[in-house]
Image (cartoon, rainbow, N blue to C red):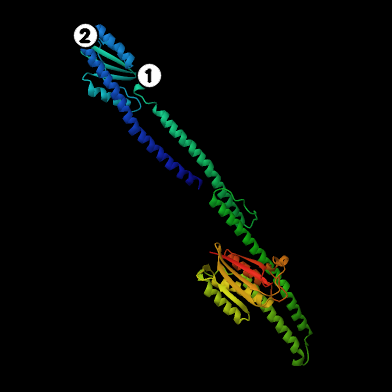
Amino acid sequence: MLGRSLLIVLIPLLVTQVISQGLFYGNFLGVASRRLSDSVASEIVLSLKTLERLHSQSDKQWFVNQAQDQLHLIEIWKPGFQLTRVGTNHVMGPMDENLAHALESSVDHPLFIDWHTDRHTVFVFIQLSDGILEVQVPRKRLDMGQLWLFVSWTAGSSFLLFLLASLFLRNQVRAIRRLAYAAEQFGLGRDVGPIRPYGAQEVRKAAVAFNRMQDRIYRFISQRTGVLAGVSHDLRTPLTRIRLSLAMLPRSGQVDAAQVAPDIDDMIGDVDEMEHMIDSYLSFARGEGAETPQRTELRPYLEDVVAAARRAGTHFQGLEVEEGVFLVIRPDSIRRALMNLLDNARRHGGAVTLTAYATPAGACIVTDDDGEGINPELRDTVFRAFESGKGGGTGLGLTISRDIIRAHGGDMELDTAPGGGLRVSILLPW
């Protein structure tokens, strides 16, 4: 990811620099260079034509002095000299070609432009009929500055920005590497603890989600481990009673069925109790992850749940559900969670009121009963496996219900109902 991110930064940066330098070199620099060359060429042509019309040596000298003072052109007349070469010796940039083109198009005499003899002066030699006119032009009048300075500045700034981007990207990738390492260690069964979220917002969200997932999985494992311990604990009592009953049965002679009938009935009751406990344990351990989530309208769904609870003996005082509320849920799982709550209300309380309404975070389902309720200091413990109240049961109803709600990304809270009983609030996110 680091390499790809750096390429994402580097390639547009290089393309931008190439385009900017191409525009500068091919457009602005070329236009400015042509204008400077045309200006110098016009002054040289003006000097040449003026010197041709002046016959007096004193007038020529006066004009040469004026050209040097006003135009910064040093003109030297070399009578009898002949050019040994024509054209120009090239330098970097468009100014050499622009000056040569401007002079060749304006001057009808052979000429040679020397850029290399002096780095600060350009020598222009014009071949006349009786000698050579040497014109010394300050290079600063033709050169807009060293091209390599512009290239170095743009390349240096690009390198500096790329270096800063690399440092920032390394920090972002380091956060992702830490998350990947924690996930790998967690997959190997090693407890690395929660990771500290840092980095970009998306990486922090991923770290927070990983910590929540890790906590849910640890809680899941702890609960399942508790189930295994509870199975051996809760099944030991009925198995012991069955063993004692079998030990007390006669092993020889004739047996009166009427005498052993109570023992047989007790053993059948113990078997039924064991079957009920095993069904609850299997339901808890099986989980509800295989069901496909569906978009469900809340009002008719809850009306069906209430109708089923009424057939089971639950008495309802009222049902208030907001119209037009839809949720993406696993219908059978949520139904099971609600039926567990309503069954607890039936066994421990009395009449039940069920309300449901929409909130910005999701849909809220509230059940209130008029029973004795649960003491505030005991509300955390009732969610533990095998914490059964005095109404009987395996103590897994609230545990299973909360696991189902949390598997949907929601949560369940216990509070005191307005009638003094227990209020259970369920929040299911959108």
Position of 404 with respect to 121 (left or right) is right
Position of 349 with respect to 59 (left or right) is right
Q: Position of residue 225 (x, y in %)?
A: 68, 66
Closest to the observer, 78 or 259: 78
Position of 387 with respect to 182 (left or right) is right
Q: Position of residue 51 (x, y in %)?
A: 24, 13
Above-or-below relation of 285 to 198: below
User: What's under tag 2, amino acid-wise?
Assistant: His
Q: Position of residue 347 (x, y in %)?
A: 68, 77
- Residue density around tag 2, few if under 14, some if 14–19, many if 20 or more, within 10 Å: few
Closest to the observer, 214 or 21: 21
Q: Which residue is mark 2?
A: 55
User: What's under tag 1, amino acid-wise?
Assistant: His
**Res. 358 mark:** none
Task: Inspect this view and state whether residue 46 appears.
Answer: yes
Q: Which residue is mark 1?
A: 120
Label 2: which secondary element: loop
Q: What is the spatial separation of the Cα atoms under label 2 and label 1, in whole angstroms?
A: 32 Å
